[in-house]
């Protein structure tokens, strides 16, 4: 996707600002979509689009069709949420093990949501089947994964981590801009990228140290 410099900045900077300082903890802040505003009319339309900032299993919003072009409100049934809960064990004895459970939960949530809103055939990265409909780019993936992580946290599924703001990389180190959801390991304070963009819908996201991700990590990268 070739973008002009102004559009590159619009793509990248919102994620940078979202990871900045705030007077209130992240858990108390509404999740907001990142929208690329290309004209006044589109700006007005986006500002009037409803997005559930404090998601719960019974009601939450997700982005799709590239850069939150579309927003859908959906839900998990009691049976579906039980499926998600069952991936987490009360006796999980390490943060490493919990990150594997988070990967499985995000994959399952993507699968369930994809069947409800028509994103089940979302391809890895920005591959398209001739239309943006049903496809997610990194802005969509970072937003939706943040929604899923927030629900995991508020519903008491996480013991070793907390959800953290989205962040971005790229433009200041000469690479294409890219966004990701993140988590923080409670015992160490280490932050991890939770990046679903590199994979088809319903596949487990990568969870890697944010420091590696910021330096351009992608699947196949050997971590030091």
Image: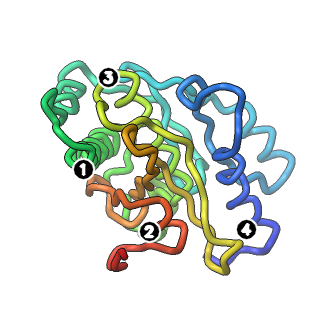
| Mark 2 or mark 1, earlier in chain | 1
Count of marks, rendered view: 4
Give the alpha-carbon distance from disc 1 to disc 4, as whole Å: 35 Å
| Mark 3 or mark 2, earlier in chain | 2
Residue 8's disc number: 4
Would you name the residue on which mark 2 appears? Answer: 125
| Mark 4 or mark 3, earlier in chain | 4
Label 4: state its secondary structure.
helix
Give the alpha-carbon distance from disc 4 to disc 2, as whole Å: 17 Å
Residue found at the far right of this picture: 40
Question: Where residue 141 sits: x, y (%)?
Answer: 47, 52
The N terminus sits in image quarter:
bottom right
Q: Which tag is nearer the camera, tag 2 or tag 1? A: 1
| Mark 3 or mark 1, earlier in chain | 1
Would you name the residue on which mark 3 appears? Answer: 156
- For the residue pair 202 and 20, the one nearer the viewer reads as 20
Residue 96's disc number: 1
Q: Which tag is nearer the camera, tag 3 or tag 2? A: 3
> Do the numbered discs 4 and 3 sit on residues whose CB atoms are within 8 Å?
no
- Determine the residue positioned at 32% across, 62% down: 200
| Mark 1 or mark 4, earlier in chain | 4
Question: Where residue 124 sits: x, y (%)?
Answer: 38, 67
- Determine the residue positioned at 43% across, 53% down: 192
Question: Where residue 145 sits: x, y (%)?
Answer: 43, 45
């Amino acid at each position: 996707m070739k973008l002009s410099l102004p559009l590159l900045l619009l793509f990248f900077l919102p994620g940078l600002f979202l990871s900045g300082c705030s007077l209130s903890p992240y858990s108390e802040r509404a999740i907001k979509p990142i929208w690329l505003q290309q004209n006044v009319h589109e700006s007005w339309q986006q500002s009037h689009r409803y997005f559930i900032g404090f998601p719960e299993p019974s009601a939450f919003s997700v982005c799709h069709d590239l850069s939150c072009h579309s927003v859908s409100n959906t839900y998990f049934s009691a049976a579906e949420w039980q499926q998600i809960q069952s991936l987490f064990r009360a006796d999980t004895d390490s943060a490493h093990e919990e990150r594997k459970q988070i990967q499985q939960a995000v994959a399952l949530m993507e699968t369930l949501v994809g069947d409800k809103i028509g994103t089940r055939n979302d391809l890895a990265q920005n591959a398209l089947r001739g239309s943006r409909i049903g496809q997610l780019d990194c802005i969509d993936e970072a937003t939706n994964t943040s929604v899923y992580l927030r629900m995991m946290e508020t519903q008491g599924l996480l013991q070793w981590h907390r959800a953290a703001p989205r962040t971005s990389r790229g433009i200041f180190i000469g690479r294409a801009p890219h966004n990701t959801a993140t988590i923080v390991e409670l015992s160490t304070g280490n932050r991890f990228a939770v990046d679903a963009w590199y994979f088809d819908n319903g596949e487990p996201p990568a969870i890697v140290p944010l420091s590696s991700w910021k330096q351009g990590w992608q699947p196949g990268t050997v971590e030091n």
